[in-house]
């Protein structure tokens, strides 16, 4: 099967490629061109990584203490919309895995996992961003040696996390394929963006 030919480091490589592409302009409003064929898992992963990268930098823009309040509100609403888009996209990725394992017969004693494949892969996307930005901190010529040393220690730990997470994702997908684990998808059911579910919105 196609999905089985991809390993977690293949997903990470897609994320890393997108992060590098974004930083050619380093602009939250710059257009991006998805290099993968529409409807493929790779294209969805690229799109998900782009959402994460833009949101990372939107969060940076809203942090300064002197940010204009009107601009901050607009950024907050954009971040909320981005969060919803990200959640929807992760669930679309999970739908691909649901289809992939739909005909697998669970083995006796098969267990569910604490998170779905796509939500584990979501963490891998964020990890790529952390590794990129800590790499920048390590190489800053205007920073103190102590700052660079502390950032290098964190970068080393992030490398360990990447190795552990990619291995865990590969194990999970293997277990789902063999039936020793069962995949269940619980939709996030976020309430804050829904005017019919958020009291702050429907009571107005």
Image (cartoon, rainbow, N blue to C red):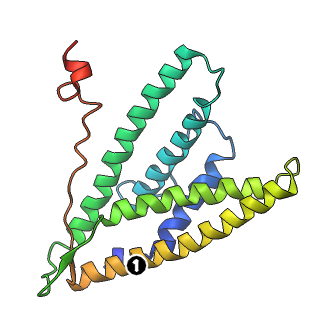
Residue 2 seen anywhere in this rendered image of the structure = no
Q: Which residue is painted at 39% across and 53% down in the image? A: 38
Element under disc 1: helix
Seen at 59% across and 39% down, the residue is: 57
Q: Is residue 192 above or below residue 201?
A: below
User: Could you tell me which residue is drawn at 67 percent across and 47 percent down?
Assistant: 23
Which quarter of the figure is the C terminus placed in?
top left
Label 1: few (<14), some (14–19) or many (≥20) C-alpha neighbours in 10 Å: some
Q: Quadrant of residue 145?
A: bottom right
Residue farthest toward the top in the current orientation of the protein: 204
- Which quadrant of the figure has residue 112? bottom left
* Residue 88 coordinates in the image, percent (x, y): 31, 46
* Image position, residue 159 (x, y; %): 61, 70
Q: Nearer the viewer, residue 13 or 142?
A: 142
Residue 192 location (% of width, % of height): 29, 32
Q: In the shown orientation, is residue 93 left or right of residue 105?
A: right
Q: Which residue is mark 1?
A: 170
In the image: residue 63, left or right of residue 42: right
Please indicate whether residue 108 sits to the left or right of residue 97 in the image.
left
Q: Position of residue 33 (x, y in %)?
A: 54, 46
Q: How many marks?
A: 1
**What residue lies at 35% left-to-right and 74% top-to-bottom?**
3
In the foreground, 171 or 92: 171
Image quarter hosting the N terminus: bottom left
Residue 98 visible, this orientation: yes
Relative depth, front residue between 6 and 127:
127
């Amino acid at each position: 099967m196609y999905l089985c030919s991809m390993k977690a480091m293949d997903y990470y490589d897609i994320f890393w490629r997108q992060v590098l592409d974004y930083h050619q302009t380093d602009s939250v409003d710059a257009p991006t061109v998805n290099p993968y064929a529409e409807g493929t898992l790779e294209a969805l992963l690229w799109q998900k990584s782009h959402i994460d990268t833009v949101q990372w930098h939107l969060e940076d823009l809203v942090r300064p203490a002197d940010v204009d309040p009107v601009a901050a509100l607009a950024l907050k609403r954009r971040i909320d919309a981005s969060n919803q888009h990200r959640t929807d996209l992760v669930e679309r990725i999970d739908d691909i895995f649901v289809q992939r394992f739909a005909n697998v017969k669970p083995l006796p004693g098969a267990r569910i996992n604490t998170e779905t494949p796509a939500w584990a892969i979501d963490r891998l996307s964020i990890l790529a961003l952390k590794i990129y930005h800590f790499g920048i901190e390590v190489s800053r010529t205007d920073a103190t040696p102590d700052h660079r040393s502390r950032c290098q220690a964190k970068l080393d730990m992030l490398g360990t996390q990447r190795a552990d997470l990619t291995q865990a994702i590969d194990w999970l997908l293997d277990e789902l394929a063999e039936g020793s684990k069962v995949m269940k998808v619980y939709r996030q059911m976020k309430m804050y963006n829904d005017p019919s579910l958020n009291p702050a919105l429907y009571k107005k």
